[in-house]
Image (cartoon, coloured by chain):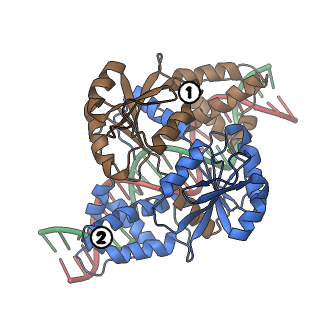
Chain colours: A blue, B brown, C red, D green
Amino acid sequence: MNLPEKTVGRLSEYRRTLLNCLVEGKTHIYSHELAQLHNITAVQVRRDIMFIGYSSMQRKGYDIQELVNVIGKILDSQDGQNVAILGTGNLGRAVIHYFVGKRSKLIITAAFDVDKSIIGTETTGVKCYDMADLEKVVKERGISIAMITVPPEQAAKATAQAVNAGIKGILNFTSIPLNVPENVYLEEYDMITSLEKVAYFVKNSQKKSVK
Amino acid sequence: MNLPEKTVGRLSEYRRTLLNCLVEGKTHIYSHELAQLHNITAVQVRRDIMFIGYSSMQRKGYDIQELVNVIGKILDSQDGQNVAILGTGNLGRAVIHYFVGKRSKLIITAAFDVDKSIIGTETTGVKCYDMADLEKVVKERGISIAMITVPPEQAAKATAQAVNAGIKGILNFTSIPLNVPENVYLEEYDMITSLEKVAYFVKNSQKKSVK
DNA sequence: GGGTGTGAAGCCGTTCACAGCA
DNA sequence: TGCTGTGAACGGCTTCACACCC
């Protein structure tokens, strides 16, 4: 029961849109409506929903609340998942700010740094610990996911420490390729690469807007 | 002569690695070495290099300097490309900081915001303008790319303004799906989606580390 | 032998085309 | 008739397998 990677990404996006629809008082939505909101095809939406095994009983479209529940059952862990920020510089702090208020099953539980002047401070309620205590805090707090926001030259070391501490998923904000064991899921999140892609396709005055 | 999207992304990554290799005094590199540094296969590297029409004349592997030059010729614009930041909050400022010192053909030329208390300030040398002046500044400075770092509720409007001002490529940091015309290239850069993907695959204790 | 370049096969994700249901 | 669910076709990207070259 492992979904295609792309589908997982879209489910996350659908959910946010659906929650907005609920707020606006909508109760049902057609596949082509949801598709239009995401600039994709209706077939794509139906295919994704097929994957998660949900189906609309009435022909009034999908029941938004139920669909949100089903997606939640798939994406979320029962009791939430704890996330650590490795690197509490500008980027790390911006990430923490970004998450503030976003009610979610993903909880930023702790930040880490090697800079003694930062250790012990709090950023909107998230405390910064010493990287040396990573393993201890990760175990105590049950943290399974890390975001790597350290400077490039520290990325490899921080990652090794994270893996060592028992982290099972990594979101890599740095532009450094990381090495992780098979059983750790690694997702790249590299601004430079993304921006250079945009620049390339702009330069070549690409005709498609690719999602 | 339009390369596959994935290849473009990897070329950007290869180049950074290759530049590091140069610094370390290396002059040649085998496909399997470059592959290992990126956790991909040697065939993949060779295929990408095939696409860009470069080939190693000697059997000592690829000439790193030449390869960097060829990649540059493909990815970079002759005179650089100017980039605007729309939204000068925590995220926008962190992005600006992140780019400081990264010598590159991509130059953050201007920041924009609607908040009068931010307009006129500078973040590490990048001046913040009034969103109302977007079109004027974009034209004056020859800006072709925008990063959307505004709060979600302003994303749609800011994007419309950007498109209107003549922006040809957008990197969307918000979690809101954007609508752009066919001739504007749009790349999503959504932290929440990426993190939820990691969370999903961690939860399902996925065995693969996918790059 | 140890590397590269590449046709062909395979895989994954998307789209087509259409049957089925209210 | 209008929408959903889905087998089958398609297309893009990756990998296999192998010819070729120093």
Q: Quadrant of the N terminus of chain A?
A: bottom right
**A194 sits to left or right of C10:** left
Q: Is residue B7 visible?
A: no
Image: A109 above or below B163: below
Quadrant of the image occupied by residue B163: top left
- What separation in Å lies between label 2 and label 1 (alpha carbons)? 48 Å
Q: Is residue B75 visible?
A: yes
Chain of the residue where label 2 is placed in the rendered structure: A
Q: Which residue is mark 1?
A: B52
Q: Which residue is mark 2?
A: A22
Which residue ends up furthest to the top in the rendered image?
B79
Quadrant of the image occupied by residue B137: top left
Residue at point 29% right, 68% down?
A23
Image: B123 above or below A115: above
The amino acid beneath tag 1 is: Ile
Q: Position of residue A35 (x, y in %)?
A: 31, 59
Quadrant of the image occupied by residue B150: top left
**B159 sits to left or right of D10:** left
Point out which mark residue A121 bears: none
Q: Position of residue A75 (x, y in %)?
A: 51, 69
Image: A49 above or below B8: below
Q: Nearer the viewer, residue B147 or B87?
A: B87
Q: Residues within 10 Å of mark 1 (few under 14, many from 20)?
A: some
